[in-house]
């Protein structure tokens, strides 16, 4: 079988290696040429995989049997349209990898915010429960790469993005977790409805023996629950639920059925992650784990030993009594709102980056309550400035670089203050990705 991989970053490269090791004829094509793409050349050469960077040689693709699309490649670009018109079968990297692990039970996590933290937390619990568990997906390590190292895991805990869901066919999670739905990726989707439709595909192959875990406090997901085939369980930080996990008087409970007594799982004080949004991530993780019969003691240990992820409300250092926090992963206004709400004091906030066509109105309305001073940078700086002015917030300054932002924050901060990088925007105007932005922030802060 001749397999064409479209996309030469990590997902595409490891899909090509997986295909090669399974005996397929493989060719990888990538239109861009940059340092990230070039860094994979030694790996492609090691596995003797033919490839091209900087162009798509359409004339080479007529004898392709299967196309594997990287999640970063939109379906409306010329090469995908050409392959569709040529009648080629197109699947995504996640779907392709999934073909080779038919016996693995998948716990899939989607949602606008909290996916990575929840995936890592569920992974932490399941690795204690079953050491063969693999953890990744959209969270750093593609499923193809995970299966190269561990071809037959009992469980796979996979962060599953809307881009990956666009190209699934048989992907069938045992448990699908949908955390929340807020405005995001409107640079790729025309409307919120279109974005929601992509997300909902996570449930499309599930049946009555499977489980859907939904946020009871999200009106969109509450409505969605009425039309799903799998068994629906909820989690809530604000309400008691009849089936699922909930927070009540600073204690977390789980209930499996209406006629059962709620079981206490953990005290909120034992959750190390800051903020109510992280309590919600814990509630979702508990629900997914309980549904697959993980013992309570293991769940508790998994939560108590979980320190969180890099670039997500990550403590960097205290200097002259000022605490610096890296939340570079916050690439939407809603995730920055959650970050602000995690602190019980006003912060010096570094905000801005590249646009996802999101509105900053709701975020700006909270500046007065949560922000001591605002430092704006990136291509969205003017847009956020307008939103701040409309919200009658005038304690802000605009800077030209992250270094300038940190230096400015240091110059105005007093002992006891918090300096928070939580950009509410993508990073591509100045950085390779949110990880690069977070690393640069930490580097700058640690050299102050």
Image (tube, grey):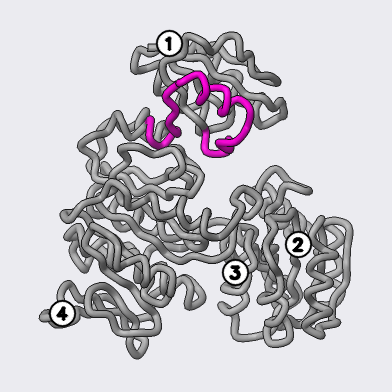
Which region is colored magenta?
70-96
Label 3 sits on residue? 334
Please indicate whether residue 360 sits to the left or right of residue 124 in the image. right
* Marking on residue 25: 1
The stretch drawn in magenta includes residue 25? no
Distance from Cα at disc 4 to Cα at disc 3: 33 Å
At which x and y percent is residue 157? Answer: 34, 49
At which x and y percent is residue 57? Answer: 63, 13
Mark 4 or mark 2, earlier in chain: 4
Image quarter for residue 142? top left
Label 4 sits on residue? 258
Label 2 sits on residue? 352
State whether residue 301 appears in this view. no
- For image coordinates 70% across by 58% down, the residue present is 357
- For image coordinates 20% across by 76% down, the residue present is 255
Q: Secondary structure at mark 2?
A: loop
Closest to the observer, 133 or 157 = 157
Neighbours of disc 2 within 10 Å: few (<14), some (14-19), many (20+): many
Q: Secondary structure at mark 3?
A: helix
At which x and y percent is residue 129? Answer: 23, 54
Whether the residues at callouts 1 and 3 have beta carbons within 8 Å, the answer is no
Whether the residues at callouts 1 and 4 have beta carbons within 8 Å, the answer is no
Mark 1 or mark 4, earlier in chain: 1
């Amino acid at each position: 079988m001749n397999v064409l991989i479209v996309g030469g970053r990590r997902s595409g490269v490891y899909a090509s290696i997986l295909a090669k090791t399974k005996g397929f004829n493989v060719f990888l094509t990538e239109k861009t040429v940059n340092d990230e793409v070039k860094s994979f050349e030694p790996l492609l050469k090691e596995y003797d995989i033919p490839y091209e960077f900087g162009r798509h040689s359409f004339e080479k693709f007529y004898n392709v049997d299967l196309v594997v699309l990287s999640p970063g490649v939109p379906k409306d670009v010329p090469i995908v349209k050409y392959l569709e018109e040529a009648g080629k079968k197109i699947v995504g990297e996640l779907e392709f990898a999934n073909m080779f692990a038919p016996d693995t039970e998948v716990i899939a996590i989607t949602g606008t915010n909290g996916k990575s933290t929840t995936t890592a937390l569920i992974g932490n619990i399941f690795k204690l429960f079953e050491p063969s568990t693999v953890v990744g997906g959209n969270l750093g390590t593609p499923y193809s790469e995970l299966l190269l190292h561990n071809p037959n895991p009992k469980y796979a805990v996979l962060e599953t993005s809307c881009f990956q869901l666009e190209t699934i066919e048989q992907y069938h999670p045992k448990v699908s977790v949908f955390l929340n739905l807020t405005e995001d990726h409107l640079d790729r989707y025309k409307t919120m409805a279109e974005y929601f439709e992509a997300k909902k595909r996570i449930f499309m192959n599930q049946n009555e023996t499977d489980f859907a875990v939904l946020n009871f406090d999200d009106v969109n997901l509450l409505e969605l629950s009425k039309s799903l085939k799998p068994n629906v369980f909820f989690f809530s930080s604000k309400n008691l639920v009849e089936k699922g996990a909930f927070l009540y008087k600073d204690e977390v409970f789980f209930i499996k059925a209406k006629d059962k007594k709620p079981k206490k799982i953990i005290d909120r004080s034992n959750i190390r992650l800051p903020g109510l949004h992280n309590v919600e991530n814990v509630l979702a993780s508990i629900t997914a784990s309980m549904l697959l019969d993980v013992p309570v003691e293991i769940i508790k240990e998994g939560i108590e030993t979980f320190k969180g992820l890099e670039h997500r409300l990550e403590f960097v250092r205290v200097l002259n009594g000022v605490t610096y926090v890296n939340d570079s992963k916050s690439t939407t206004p809603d995730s920055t709102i959650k970050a602000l709400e995690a602190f019980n004091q006003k912060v010096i906030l570094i905000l801005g980056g590249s646009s996802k066509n999101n509105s900053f109105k709701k975020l700006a309305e909270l500046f007065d309550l949560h922000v001591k001073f605002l430092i704006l940078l990136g291509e969205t700086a003017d847009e956020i400035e307008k939103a701040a002015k409309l919200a009658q917030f005038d304690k802000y300054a605009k800077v030209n670089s992250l270094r300038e932002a940190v230096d400015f924050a240091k110059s105005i901060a007093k002992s006891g203050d918090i300096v928070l990088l939580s950009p509410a925007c993508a990073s591509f105007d100045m950085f390779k990705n949110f990880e690069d932005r977070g690393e640069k922030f930490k580097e700058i802060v640690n050299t102050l």
